[in-house]
Image (cartoon, coloured by chain):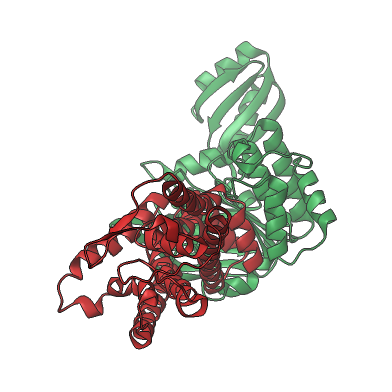
Chain colours: A red, B green
């Protein structure tokens, strides 16, 4: 059943748009870096450093995450979730699925797993594409400059920085995916799911400026992946954030299941 | 086959409210094994809502149903493999062809035999069509829906307006398929508002009106001979004289070489005597059986005139 769910997913061109979007993000980053755009930053001493000579495949890979995680990657994840759930409601295919296969729990669990797989694949794809294109255009050579102001440490550590950054960003995106599952159960169109999911994140982000409630909002932890670039890396803080996000993800999915299990299929 | 077996579908006070609108009201019906059960009602009467409740797509506000002995919706998934369903507008994945859609569901149903899939597509005249479902006409969609319903040799076929969008040839084919399946032992629950179609194939019918089941029974019992006769006699002038002058004839119309006469059942032989005694040669005096349409209108009209013989539930 999971294979069929994935088969259906990959037969939809909308899914490829999200992968294409990730690819475009990387391509645009590379074009900007290659075009001689101003990539200077001012360090604490007041002097300016041109980043361009420092750019390599790892830089591109890290910077893609920095640019993509605040909005674009969550957007793509939400789009894929909508294709898994909302589209079936909107087109009425969920009705055929239910009356032929039955078992709402089984269908829901399969769809959630497919959703997690596509989220993971999207992130892996983004990482591979950014690294490959980065290597193609800028090489792999390690640079020697280290600055706390840079988005990633140079020289890097593959194990200490890149893998944790991608691992924790995966947890962040999974939380977004689970939130989208919840909203997609209650939506009638892909646009509605997108609007609800991204509005929730944006509104909670604004609310997180209130320090008293900040620790209770999951959006306060959606940037934990960026701490993988810190020196030293605050592992305890990272893990705490990951656990909180995991609990929220579980909550979203359980709540979504109860809504789905009792939902009247009117289409 | 007709109404001779154990109950296959039973509803017990099934009720559905959409906020303030009562869609189905305390519906209790029974479909027996071997029936072709015509579920009749106007658009918006509650037919589709009832079917969706039977299939676990909608949750009843009150009451419950049993399908193939399983309580709905809790135990429905146990019996779903024995049920074939055609919904009002069959929905398939638009980006797949009909065959791909059927393959997908066959895989989920554990059917690995590709020959079986092709045979089913052939049965509904869709074999070899390479178009995506999104490019299908309404008739093709209905036929693909029927193919999916037949894929797993169902014991029970639930059809919601199955001839929706079909051309006359398609309607004829679907009716034949239904009759053939029923002969093979498949129980059919058929919802429709096209009464002539249902009358032709149904063995039992239930009539739903404004969410309530207002009549249920065997078609033969419901469509009794009424108080209208077809009279064939000559000479015409004498016949006209008798019919006009007779105190037992309520009214009559002339249709070519025959007359449609409205007369109470107990006065039929008296009318025959009057005609013969007047020197009229009577060729035929045939009671006219009411149609499902007559019956339907008689019980769903503003003034509910339900014939005693029709109240069989």
Q: Can residue A1 be seen at all in this image of the molecule?
A: no
Q: Can residue A124 be seen at all in this image of the molecule?
A: yes
Residue closer to the observer: B70 or A120: A120
**Exactly how many numbered labels are in the figure?**
0
Q: Give left or right: position of B248 versus B101.
A: left
Q: Quadrant of residue B271?
A: top right
Position in image of residue A157 (x %, y %): 48, 76
Q: Quadrant of residue B231?
A: top right
**Residue that lies at the very extreme toward the bottom in this rendered image:** A236
Residue closer to the observer: B227 or B242: B227
**Residue that lies at the very extreme toward the top in this rendered image:** B237
Residue at x 58% of width, y 40% of height: B164
Q: Give left or right: position of B238 versus A164.
A: right
Residue at x 49% of width, y 65% of height: A58
Residue closer to the observer: B264 or B4: B4
The quarter in which the N terminus of chain A is drawn is bottom right
Position in image of residue A185 (x %, y %): 41, 62
Position in image of residue A48 (x %, y %): 28, 58
Q: Quick check: A23 above or below A127?
A: above
Residue closer to the observer: B284 or A127: A127
Position in image of residue A94 (x %, y %): 53, 58
Residue at x 53% of width, y 37% of height: B264
Residue at x 70% of width, y 50% of height: B100
Q: Quick check: B45 above or below A74?
A: above
Q: Quadrant of residue A197?
A: bottom left
């Amino acid at each position: 059943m999971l294979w069929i769910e994935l088969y259906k997913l990959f037969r939809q061109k909308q899914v490829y748009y999200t992968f294409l979007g990730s690819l475009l993000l990387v391509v645009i980053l590379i074009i900007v870096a290659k075009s001689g755009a101003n990539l200077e930053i001012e360090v604490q001493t007041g002097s300016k450093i041109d980043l361009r000579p420092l750019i390599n495949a790892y830089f591109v890979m890290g910077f893609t995450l920095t640019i993509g995680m605040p909005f674009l990657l969550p957007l793509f994840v939400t789009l894929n979730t909508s294709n898994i759930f909302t589209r079936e409601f909107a087109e009425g295919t969920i009705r055929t699925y239910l009356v032929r296969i039955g078992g709402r729990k089984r269908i829901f669990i399969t769809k959630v797993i497919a959703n997690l797989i596509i989220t993971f694949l999207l992130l892996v794809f983004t990482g591979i594409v950014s690294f490959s294109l980065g290597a193609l255009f800028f090489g792999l050579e390690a640079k020697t400059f280290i600055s706390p102001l840079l988005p990633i440490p140079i020289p890097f550590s593959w194990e200490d920085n890149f893998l944790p950054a991608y691992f924790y960003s995966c947890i962040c995106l999974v939380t977004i995916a689970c939130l989208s599952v919840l909203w997609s159960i209650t939506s009638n169109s892909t646009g509605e799911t997108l609007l609800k999911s991204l509005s929730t994140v944006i509104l909670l982000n604004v609310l997180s400026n209130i320090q008293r409630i900040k620790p209770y909002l999951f959006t306060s932890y959606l940037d934990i992946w960026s701490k993988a670039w810190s020196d030293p890396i605050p592992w305890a803080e990272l893990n705490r954030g990951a656990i909180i996000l995991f609990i929220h993800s579980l909550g979203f999915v359980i709540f979504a299941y109860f809504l789905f299990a009792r939902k009247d299929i009117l289409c | 086959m007709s109404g001779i077996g154990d109950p296959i579908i039973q509803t017990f006070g099934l009720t559905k409210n959409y906020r303030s609108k009562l869609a189905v009201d305390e519906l209790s019906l029974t479909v027996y094994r071997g029936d072709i059960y015509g579920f009749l009602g106007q658009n918006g009467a509650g037919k589709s809502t009832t079917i969706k409740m039977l299939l676990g797509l909608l949750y009843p506000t009150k009451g419950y149903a049993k399908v193939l002995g399983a309580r709905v919706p809790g135990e429905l998934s146990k019996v779903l493999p024995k049920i074939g369903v055609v919904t009002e507008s069959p929905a398939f994945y638009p980006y797949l062809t009909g065959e791909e859609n059927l393959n997908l569901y066959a895989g989920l149903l554990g059917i690995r035999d590709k020959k079986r899939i092709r045979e089913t597509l052939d049965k509904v005249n869709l074999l070899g069509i390479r178009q995506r479902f999104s490019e299908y006409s309404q008739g093709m969609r209905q036929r693909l829906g029927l193919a999916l319903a037949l894929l797993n040799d169902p014991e029970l076929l639930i059809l919601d307006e199955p001839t929706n969008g079909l051309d006359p040839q398609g309607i004829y084919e679907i009716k034949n398929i239904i009759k053939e399946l029923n002969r093979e032992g498949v129980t059919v629950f058929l919802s429709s508002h096209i009464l002539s179609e249902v009358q032709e194939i149904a063995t039992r019918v239930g009539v739903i009106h404004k969410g309530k089941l207002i009549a249920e029974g065997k078609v033969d019992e419901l469509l009794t001979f009424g108080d209208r006769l077809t009279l064939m006699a000559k000479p015409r002038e004498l016949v006209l004289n008798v019919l006009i002058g007779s105190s037992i004839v309520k009214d009559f119309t002339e249709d070519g070489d025959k007359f449609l006469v409205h007369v109470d059942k107990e006065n039929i032989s008296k009318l025959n005597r009057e005609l013969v005694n007047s020197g009229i040669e009577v060729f035929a005096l045939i009671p006219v059986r009411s149609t499902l349409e007559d019956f339907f209108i008689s019980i769903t009209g503003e003034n509910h005139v339900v014939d005693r013989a029709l109240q069989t539930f």
